[in-house]
Image: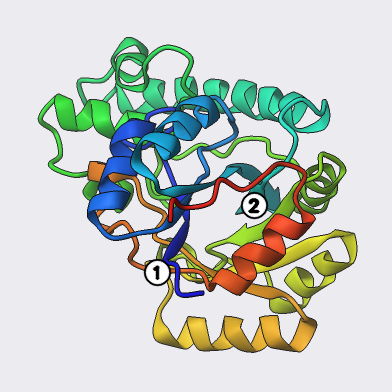
Amino acid sequence: MAWLCDLHTHSTFSDGTSTPRELFTQARQGGLDLIGLTDHDTTAGWEQAREAARETGVGLMVGAEVSCAWRGVTVHMLSYLHDPLAPGLPALFETIHASRRARVADMVERIGRDYPLTLADVEAQAGEGVAIGRPHIADALIAAGCFSHRNEVFATILHPASPYYVRYCAPDPREVIETITECGGVAVMAHPRPLSRQRRVVPAHVIASWRDVGLFGIEVDHPDHTREWREALGVLTARYGLHRTGSSDFHGRGKTTTLGENLTDWEVVEAIAERGRMDLVLPAT
């Protein structure tokens, strides 16, 4: 099977700039066969994504990107095809959202001392019912004319080394993986070697140990990963029997990445579908 699959994208239900319908239209125009909708700590966009998949003929793998942390290092865990009605993940999402809201308020207060920024500005960028986060702070600063692009904001005042940066309480990755599995989902570690923090990353042996609690794979091919990191992560997946995925982590206008920039082999997509509780929406033939 030669279907082209990008398993990590974001919509306006978290920090993407495209609605699910726009996202699927872009995928069809770009020649993709299937995409994964993985908004941050929410499944709110799944219904619209299913409608868009039916309208465009582009396949869908539902999911979410779950926030967690290992010894102060931010970790994102992709959960694919979990049951949204199972109690574990929704409860975890609410805890994460509460922590994010408190963090955003603290960061806005700090940034507002030096830039024209209020919490109302940030909430207006996020919209009602959206999991608020740093990208919405960036968008508010761009709207105020302080910066020109999200990447510029994240490289400066939203960078972890910035005095404006505030950490937030996030669950341990082992807990998240176990919860994903209990909810019938399939756990894949997202972008473990982002360019923004290569000095503070989760060691390979720790990632390998998460296989024992259900880690299915690692997002090896990602826009933030250098060739060297991809090679090293490829060795890690092969050594410990983990699956390799590839994705664009597409955010629309929010990041300088292209939908379909990295892809996942169809055999891996099938393996996820076999383990997940929810059905895969296959591409129209």
| CA neighbours of label 2 inside 10 A, class few (<14), some (14 to 19), many (20+) | many
Horizontal and vertical percent for residue 211?
Answer: 82, 68
- Residue 77's tag is 2
Dot 1: what SS? loop
Q: Which amino acid type corresponds to the residue marked 1 in the rendered image?
A: Asn
238 w.r.t. 279: above or below? below
Q: Residue at x 28, y 15 (%)?
A: 121
Q: CA distance from mark 2 to mark 1?
A: 18 Å
Q: Is residue 284 left or right of residue 174?
A: left
Q: Choose top left, top right, bottom left or bottom right for residue 20.
A: top left
Work out whether residue 197 or residue 163 is closer to the camera in this orientation and state it. 197
20 w.r.t. 66: above or below? above
Q: Choose top left, top right, bottom left or bottom right for residue 140.
A: top left
Q: Which amino acid type corresponds to the residue marked 2 in the rendered image?
A: Met
Seen from this angle, which residue lies furthest front? 285
Q: How is the image coloured?
A: rainbow
Q: Is residue 32 left or right of residue 208?
A: left
Q: Residue at x 33, y 20 (%)?
A: 122
User: Of callouts 2 and 1, which one flags the residue occurring earlier in the amino acid sequence?
Assistant: 2
Q: Residue at x 63, y 70 (%)?
A: 268
- Residue 262's tag is 1
Horizontal and vertical percent for residue 14?
Answer: 45, 31
Q: Is residue 21 left or right of residue 100?
A: left
Horizontal and vertical percent for residue 42?
Answer: 58, 30
Quarter of the image where the C terminus is located: bottom left
